Amino acid sequence: MTNKKSHKRNYSVKRVGGHLHKVIPIADEAGKVLHYAIKPLMVELRARDLMQIVVGSVLLAIPVGFTEEVWRLGQELTNASIIWFALFSISFIAVFVYSNLYHNHLKGYEFEYIKRVLAVYIISLTVVGIFMTLIGKCPWGIDTALAIKRIIIVAFPASMSATLSDMVK
């Protein structure tokens, strides 16, 4: 029989070079700490993260925004469908961000978590809105509701790529 020890991780959180890091002691069999492993703890939203979100949202906003199918879908979907689309987008971002960045570190960083989820979606909406306006597919003065619908539709894939881009460190 093997003797199973508890593998509960023992770590501390320290600020190194202005950024939060998880500091994990690496010990020998006797429990003597040999060295420390340092891993970035990505729970704070920083300027670099915002730029990654912008770039990530552009990655899918451009190819999806150029499709005629999206333009037509904006005309065909009901307002209720668009609201559900937006809620689905935010929910997906929230689950993905939680599972990849905050699942073991939410306590004490709840505001940062909410801020990151909202930042991803709002920045994606903004990037898509600017892009769709530039290509003339947001008829703001003629049909504002259609413009908003198209932005929300394109923001779904754009926010997904923004979320993935934000995870890269």
Image: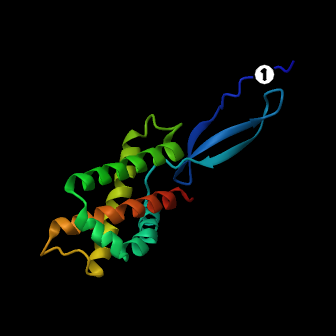
Q: Is residue 11 above or below residue 149?
A: above
Residue 40 in the image: x percent, y percent? 58, 50
Tell me if residue 112 can be seen. Answer: no
Q: Measuring 35% from the left and 49% from the top, which residue is drawn there? A: 88
Pick out the residue farthest to the bottom.
135
Q: Quadrant of the C terminus?
A: bottom right
Q: Is residue 82 above or below residue 158?
A: above
Residue 10 horizontal side relative to residue 72, left or right: right
Q: Name the kind of residue labelled 1 in the image.
A: Lys
Q: Quadrant of the N terminus?
A: top right
Residue 152 is drawn in which quadrant? bottom left
Residue 106 horizontal side relative to residue 144, left or right: right
Residue 50 in the image: x percent, y percent? 42, 62
Residue 128 in the image: x percent, y percent? 33, 69
Q: How is the image coloured?
A: rainbow
Q: Measuring 42% from the left and 49% from the top, which residue is drawn there? A: 92
Pick out the residue farthest to the left.
142
Tell me if residue 160 can be seen. Answer: yes
Residue located beneath label 1 in the image: 4
Residue 143 in the image: x percent, y percent? 14, 71
Residue 69 is drawn in which quadrant? bottom left
Q: Measuring 65% from the left and 31% from the top, which residue is drawn there? A: 10
Residue 62 horizontal side relative to residue 87, left or right: right
Q: Is residue 47 above or below residue 88?
A: below
Q: Which is nearer the eye, 163 or 38?
A: 163
Q: Secondary structure at mark 1?
A: loop
Mark 1, other Cα within 10 Å: few <14 / some 14–19 / many ≥20: few
Q: Which is nearer the eye, 84 or 26?
A: 84
Pick out the residue farthest to the front.
76
Tally the marks: 1
